[in-house]
Image (tube, rainbow, N blue to C red):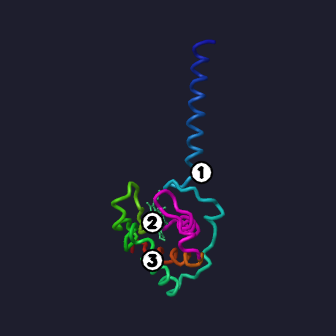
Amino acid sequence: MKTNQIKLIAISAGMLVALSFTTISKAQTAGGWTIPAAAKATKNPVAANAASTAEGKDLYAKHCKSCHGAKGLGDGAKAATLDVSCSDFSTKKFQGTTDGEMFFQISEGKGKMPAFKKTIPEANSRWAIVNYMRTMAAK
Ligand code: HEC
């Protein structure tokens, strides 16, 4: 085999490896969450009215505030003890995710983020938390 041919093969192989890496990373969201398309597209069945937002606020204070902080800035008391960021719910980027994505994240958890589908078994209560988290957008 000529040197040029060997070089060409090496370059092609390198490109293939690079290509497969891009494909893998695209299957996940920016924060490394893998959220199924169906979950992402699921509509919030609970109206964002005063009652559901108040229910969400109570549940948030009980289950989420310790890590995510009172305003969702990721500065709860427990946050400092974790080796990962608790995110910031006030950002445009976070608020740009769908209700379905948030609901999935709350239900399933990931790493240090607990799954709440058993702790808060009522799905509509988890949707109420999503409604409350919408009030955390930076003004
Ligand atoms: C023990 C600490 C802890 C508690 C309690 C906790 N979380 Fe989390 N949460 C995390 C961490 C850490 C992450 C980031 C996980 C990762 O990316 O690996 C996270 C991520 C999230 C995300 C995704 C953020 C993003 O930018 O994509 C949402 C939504 C979320 N939490 C909501 C909640 C809600 C709602 C509750 C309460 C029902 C809650 N969390 C309770 C630690 C916690």
- Residue drawn at 38 percent across, 65 percent down: 74
User: Secondary structure under badge 1?
Assistant: loop
- Residue topped by disc 3: 135
| Residue 88 x, y percent position in the rendering | 41, 65
- Residue topped by disc 2: 92
Region rendered in magenta: 95-121
- Residue topped by disc 1: 27
- Residue drawn at 45 percent across, 80 percent down: 57
| Residue 133 x, y percent position in the rendering | 47, 74
Q: Nearer the viewer, residue 115 or 48?
A: 115
Dot 1 alpha-carbon crowd within 10 angstroms: few under 14, some 14 to 19, many 20 or more: few
- Residue 23 among magenta residues: no
Q: Is residue 82 above or below residue 21?
A: below
User: Secondary structure under badge 2?
Assistant: helix
Dot 2 alpha-carbon crowd within 10 angstroms: few under 14, some 14 to 19, many 20 or more: few
Say which label, 2 or 3, has the lower sequence index. 2
Q: Nearer the viewer, residue 10 or 81?
A: 81
- Residue drawn at 61 percent across, 64 percent down: 40
